[in-house]
Amino acid sequence: EGERKQVTVLFADVKGSMELLADRDPEEVRKILDPVLTLMMAAVHHYEGTVNQVMGDGIMALFGAPLAHEDHAVRACYAALRMQDVLRRYSEELRRAQGVEVQIRVGINSGDVVVRSIGSDLRMDYSAVGQTTNLAARMEQLAAPGSIRLTAETLHLAEGFVQVTPLGPVPIKGLGEPGEVFELVGPGAARTRLEAAARRGLTRFVGRSAELEQLRGALDRASLGHGQVVAVVGEPGVGKSRLFWELTHSHRVLFEKGATPPSRSPGGWLILQSASVSYGKATAYLPVIELLRGYFAIESRDDPRKIREKVTGKVLTLAPALAPGTRPMLNTCSATSRPTPTGSTPRAARPTTARRWRWPSRAACAPSSPTATSASASSTRAWTSASRRRSISARRRRCTATWTCGSGSRRRRRRRRHPDDLDKHRVSTDSLLTCQPVRGGRVCPA
């Protein structure tokens, strides 16, 4: 028995999978496609969506069923942006390692469907039936590699929260008339429904004169140097957010010339805003993170270097004694629950790949002579006895690794020895090699 619900359906698959599968062993194809599917499903789960079908090189996901969300369209758009971000990073690493590029295309549509469970004693599937599902699949087929297409119904529900490029009426297979299609390019500036509504235009504010006078009185006392804390409490929907918005956008806050320190407001007030969002449960301390990002003026397009410059400059300007707290603030400001625009994937969302030992050339592994030793003292400093004594506590564990011996012509696998055990195996410092580290790897004597 089915249930009628309003949901957002998302389809995503790998473009050109047939060309990718051609002339490749199935095991090799599995190693390429499995991380792609894992990253796509992780993006859906991050925004509490449900992956109800995995179709070889693609997935189908539902937002709003079986878990109901009033912002299911926004969650689907953010999940699609997150998919493209993490897959773009994975494709770059895959291209450098194997010379293969992977691109996905995503289609999104919102509307009414009938959700139901189909299956037997051996298997149970959760599916959505209706024109909404078919139209989402058509959007995915129309999308270019690396892009996201959505319908006007989805944009109507997510307007203000996302940035789109209109593509005009597009003929859609199965429909008699062309439909409006949009390309999703990034997240919008709005974080709450009130901010999204303010961009479209708010109705005239009526009443609440007593509450506004109380807030203005607290504002006047704060301008005289007496700190104030005001809590606005009320039932959902009575206008708490609108009351706060009216205060922060009033003439007294924006244009009064009373405060001396410079700020974003012409009136001298520094306004910092932070709010909890329904899709931010996966990010700890999200309101605090957003508060710090607003204070340091960090934007979603800022790269790690730009974030470091803003945080360091602001902290050192306040007081040089706060310099030790710069690193924790950098780690906090780098976390985010919102998708980032193209080319600025958050560090937490990047796929991790195993690092392998990389062998230097034969010339780099030649035994060190007195001249070479003096010229490369910095590269061999890590293998002096003093450095070995300092790294005893950090290198207690044993692991299996590959070592290069002699001139590099022989390679064998042995168990890594503790630095204190080098003398037991008659390895003197004269036999140490002069090798430059290669991407963090080291070449050590057996």
Image: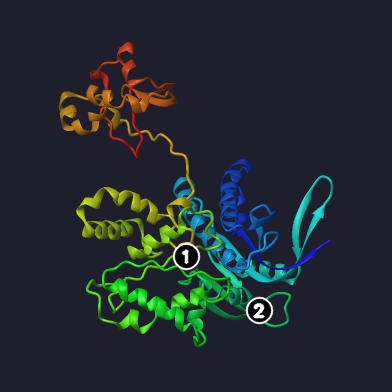
Query: Could you tell me which quadrant the N terminus lies in?
Result: bottom right
Residue in the picture at 18% in, 29% down: 372
Please indicate whether residue 229 sits to the left or right of residue 140 in the image: left
Name which quarter of the figure residue 167 lies in.
bottom right
Residue 390 coordinates in the image, percent (x, y) = 27, 26
Residue 428 coordinates in the image, percent (x, y) = 26, 16
The amino acid sitting under disc 2 is Pro
Residue in the picture at 48% in, 80% down: 199
Nearer to us of marks 1 and 2 is 1
Residue in the picture at 36% in, 77% down: 217
Residue 154 coordinates in the image, percent (x, y) = 61, 73
Name which quarter of the figure residue 296 lies in.
bottom left
Disc 1 is placed on an element classified as loop
Query: Could you tell me which quadrant the C terminus lies in?
Result: top left
Query: Which label's residue is closer to the chain start, 1 or 2?
Result: 2
Q: Which mark is residue 275?
A: 1
Q: Nearer the viewer, residue 423 or 115?
A: 115
Q: Which mark is residue 171?
A: 2
In the depicted structure, whether residue 32 falls above or below residue 17: above
